[in-house]
Amino acid sequence: MSNATKIAGFITTKNYLDRITPIPSSFLSKTKTTGDAAIQVQTNRQFQTIEGFGGAFTEAAATTLYKMPKPVQRAIIDAYFNAKTGHGYTFCRTHINSCDFSLGNYAYVDTPGDTELTSFSIDRDRKALIPFIRSAMDTAQNQLKILASPWSPPAWMKTNGQMNHGGKLKTEFAKTWAKYYCKYIQEYSVAGIPIWGISVQNEPAANQTWDSCLYTAEEERDFVRDHLGPALEDADLPHIKLVIWDHNRDKMYERAKVVYEDPEAAKFVWGTGFHWYGDDHFENVQKSYDAFPDKKLIFTEGCQEGGPHIGSWDLGERYATSIINDLNRGTVAWIDWNLILDEQGGPNHVGNYCSAPIIADTNSGKCIYQSSYYYLGHFSRFIRPGSVRVFSKSTIQDLQVLSVVTPDKKIVIVIMNSSDKQIPFNLCINQNEQSIVSPPHSIMTLISNQ
């Protein structure tokens, strides 16, 4: 292979100390491996443009951050948002009103019947959430898109009179609730945080013990068409991207179809958001991509449920499996859930503890960087916004692959080996071949000139 010496890259392995470290030359050989095991990359077959990777700013994450010593706070922010020394995150999410990863239920308007939103206030967010986002923005040099999602309207706007346990938006408050999103966007802009887009509702098909609100597909369509879309236009906010569904892959196609088949609703919608809870259903990502080519796909939330899972290698492999499969099916951005949580996997006001790529031990003041942190870095550090996915295929069941061409014309190939064995294979980039060795339970990012 004439350009074999031009391939370099980084690797993370379970069995060794490699953590996004340069790949040893012993894993890269000019000699072709015997046999048919191969990964093929064809850069002339191009697909979607990638918009970025990131995680979620929650009140829980922000509160945890500010419990840590200031040098540790700085290290955490750099680990995620510094493009030179960290992951270089560019696409993140936050919540409108409270979510389960808040310290309790809260809304920006608590006065029942205040349909003019005169008492609207984001003061609670100014305590920790807004400072966290502002620090991240500064570190990312303002190259940060923020998607904001509501978990529930204020209790007084809902049929069940509370923010938790589902319920629905009362019809008489639909116009007010639409104006509420606009007010939020405006207030955050004044606070120095431009909002890139909003989703209509987090997990609209889930009646949760925490902050939640139910919409059928038809109700979501009608709210977008008759209230939220027009409200954004009336508030001079037509540039705000609008995301529907924001729930699991299982029903993403059917839910999107209802909205997109109504042209008056569809014209307001940028794309479909989805989560990973439940079965994978990657086929529905592909189905949505094929059926609605003029709309975008964005993974808006995923985490390992049931506590912090400290030290688990499965975390990283679950993340990489999702990213590779979602992006190979047309997804343009991928957002993790909480950026940081405490040693319990919280705080969470209903005990719904989960894992995060960085776990903070608030007692010792030290952080644990999970396998998920390093696996995420193999994508976000090298697949920069503006990269274009290109065709790649693995003939090896235990090797998954994702390939892009970056804005500076580098070929970036991410390969994950989730098996217990070392796998030698031939990497064929266009017409050039080179032998590679993939260690067990590893992820590598290979970088080559075109």
Image: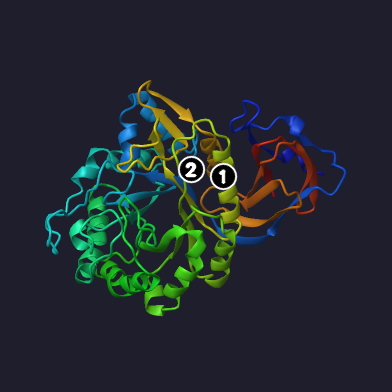
The amino acid at mark 2 is: Gln
In the rendered structure, find residue 304 and report the number of the disc placed on it.
2
* Rendered location of residue 291, percent (x, y): 55, 72
- Quarter of the image holding residue 30? top right
Q: Is residue 97 left or right of residue 417?
A: left
* Rendered location of residue 120, percent (x, y): 16, 54
**Gap in angstroms between the C-alphas marked 1 and 2:** 9 Å
On the image, numbered disc 1 is attached to which residue?
318
Residue 267 visible in image: no
The amino acid at mark 1 is: Arg
Residue at position x 51%, y 54% from top? Answer: 278
Q: Is residue 213 left or right of residue 260?
A: left
In the rendered structure, find residue 290 and report the number of the disc placed on it.
none
**Residues at circles 1 and 2 in contact by the CB criterion of under 8 Å:** yes
Q: Is residue 300 left or right of residue 108?
A: right
For residue 324, above or below residue 264? above
Mark earlier in primary sequence (1, 2): 2
- Residue at the right extreme? 34
SS category of the residue bearing label 2: loop
In this view of the protein, which residue sits in the foreground, 135 or 424? 424
In this view of the protein, which residue sits in the foreground, 90 or 323? 323
Residue at position x 60%, y 54% from top? Answer: 325
Rate crowding at label 2 as few (under 14), some (14 to 19) or many (20 or more) other CA atoms within 10 Å: many
Rate crowding at label 1 as few (under 14), some (14 to 19) or many (20 or more) other CA atoms within 10 Å: some
Residue 210 visible in image: yes
Residue at position x 48%, y 39% from top? Answer: 83
- Residue at the top extreme? 364
Question: In which quadrant will I find the N terminus?
Answer: top right
For residue 98, above or below residue 315? below
SS category of the residue bearing label 1: helix
* Rendered location of residue 188, percent (x, y): 26, 51
How many marks on residues? 2
